[in-house]
Amino acid sequence: MAVTVHIPTPLRKLTGNESEVQVEAATVAALVEGLEEAYAGMKEKLFDETGDIRRYVNIYINEEDIRFLDGKDTALKDGDSVSIVPAIAGGC
């Protein structure tokens, strides 16, 4: 099942500056593996050394935060839209 993945600007150097890519995957974990196969280096940007999603990375499926679903085990459906959003901090 193909899903559309929206790539944030800081990760586009890995995708040849593509802002959207298509990946075949049944879960978020499989999606990250698929991204890694197609775009080397993506997995280390999204997952930590224990295999969990990095704290500063937010992943949304059709605008729903996967942290409130099944995390990296969240199921994907054909046509889903997945957004990777790095957390932004700052201020005075």
Image: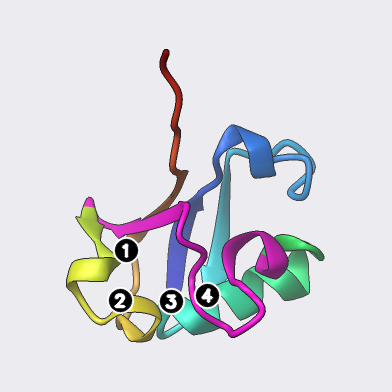
Mark number, residue 80 = 1
> Which range of residues does the magenta coloring cover?
43-63
How far is the residue under mark 2 from the one under mark 4?
Answer: 11 Å
Name the residue: 66% across, 59% down: 45
- Tell me if residue 62 comes above or below residue 53 in the rendering: above
Seen from the viewer's position, the closer of residues 75 and 78 is 75
Cα separation, mark 1 vs mark 3, equals 11 Å
Q: Are marks 2 and 4 in contact (CB under 8 Å)?
A: no
* Furthest-front residue in this view: 92
Q: Which residue is mark 4?
A: 31
State if disc 2 and disc 1 touch (CB < 8 Å): yes
Q: Is residue 67 above or below residue 50?
A: above
Q: Mark 1 or 4 closer to N-term?
A: 4
**Type of residue at label 2?**
Lys
From the image, tell me which residue sits under label 2.
Answer: 77
Q: Find numbered disc 3 in the image and state the secondary structure of the residue it sits on.
A: helix
**Callout 4, which amino acid?**
Leu
- Of mark 1 and mark 3, the one earlier in the sequence is 3
- Judged left or right of residue 56, residue 43 is right
The residue positioned 32% from the left and 63% from the top of the image is 80
Position of the C terminus, as image quadrant, is: top left
- The amino acid type found where label 1 is placed reads Asp
Dot placed on the residue nearer the N-terminal end, 2 or 3? 3
Mark 3 is on which residue type?
A: Val
Q: CA distance from mark 2 to mark 3?
A: 11 Å
Mark 2 Cα shell of 10 Å, populated few (<14), some (14-19), many (≥20): some
Q: Which residue is mark 3?
A: 28
